[in-house]
Image: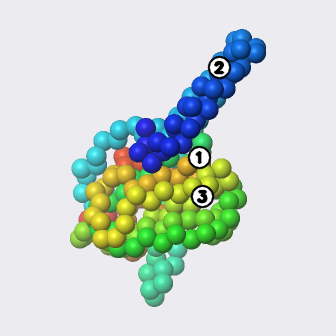
Amino acid sequence: MAPYARLEVNLILFGGAVLVVVTAALVGWWAMLPAICTLVLVSFYRDPPRRPMRRPNVLVAPADGRVVVLRREPAAEPRETTLRIDIFLSVFDVHVNRAPCGGRVIDVQHRPGRFISALRPAAAELNESNTLTIAPPAPLPGPIVVRQIAGRLARRIVCAVAPPQRVRIGQRIGMIKLGSRVELRAPQADRWQVHVRPGQHVRAGETVLAELDPR
């Protein structure tokens, strides 16, 4: 179970138990329905173990889910481009977020916003979000930016790291509760070999999104 969800899980279990008892007293076997709903809600907060990535010079998925954006975008620096990969988390995905690379956390910025569906492209610009910036070790170009974006159901973002903390690749960095979107940005897009495609389902901390070109 995710360490960021103990309060929610305890409340769900307590409420579910009360509902099962009350329903059983009134309608017998229909008590199974609230029990099933309780188990489904608790499953949203699961935190299965992941194998630590030992491959050098890669970026791994910061979240479970489906790749919905994969493109190169103009960067602030002249003649530079940024690699952008967005992952949509459905209510059935694991919602624990993990570091895409090792390095030092240099900035965390929370931005209030709306709560439209995280599947809509506008969600990346309009919704509440938390932006985490990591300075990776050489030779990876940096900074690497991870943005946790709230959705229609996900109304709470948890960020469990802060500057100047160091993180390991695949380390838990937080959670978005109940369905959301995570955006990854890496500088010098032309130096990365992309290993995923739009529509592909990825696993946080394990799926390699991109690898630094050895040339």
Question: Residue 13: x percent and y percent?
Answer: 55, 31
Q: Are marks 1 and 2 in contact (CB under 8 Å)?
A: no
Residue 138 position by quadrant = bottom left
Query: Which mark is on residue 21?
Result: 2
What's the residue at 25%, 68% (across, down)?
Answer: 137
SS for dot 2: helix
Looking at the picture, which amino acid does disc 3 mark? Answer: Ala
Mark 3 or 2: the one toward you: 2
Residue 14 position by quadrant = top right
Q: Which residue is mark 3?
A: 150
Whether residue 135 is visible here, answered yes or no, is: yes
Whether residue 203 is visible here, answered yes or no, is: no
Q: CA distance from mark 3 to mark 2?
A: 34 Å
Question: Residue 129: x percent and y percent?
Answer: 56, 65
Q: Earlier in the sequence, mark 3 or mark 1?
A: 3
Q: Are marks 3 and 1 in contact (CB under 8 Å)?
A: no
Q: Earlier in the sequence, mark 3 or mark 2?
A: 2
Q: Is residue 161 left or right of residue 23?
A: left
Q: CA distance from mark 3 to mark 1?
A: 9 Å
Q: CA distance from mark 1 to mark 2?
A: 26 Å
Q: How many residues crowd around disc 1 within 10 Å: few (fewer than 14), some, or many (20 or more)? A: many
Q: Residue furthest right?
A: 27
Frontmost residue, 8 versus 156? 8
What's the residue at 57%, 71% (across, down)?
Answer: 111
- Quadrant where the C terminus sits is bottom left
- Quadrant where the N terminus sits is top left
Q: Is residue 6 left or right of residue 21?
A: left
Q: Earlier in the sequence, mark 1 or mark 2?
A: 2
Q: How many residues crowd around disc 3 within 10 Å: few (fewer than 14), some, or many (20 or more)? A: many
Q: Is residue 10 left or right of residue 170?
A: right
Query: Which mark is on residue 178?
Result: 1
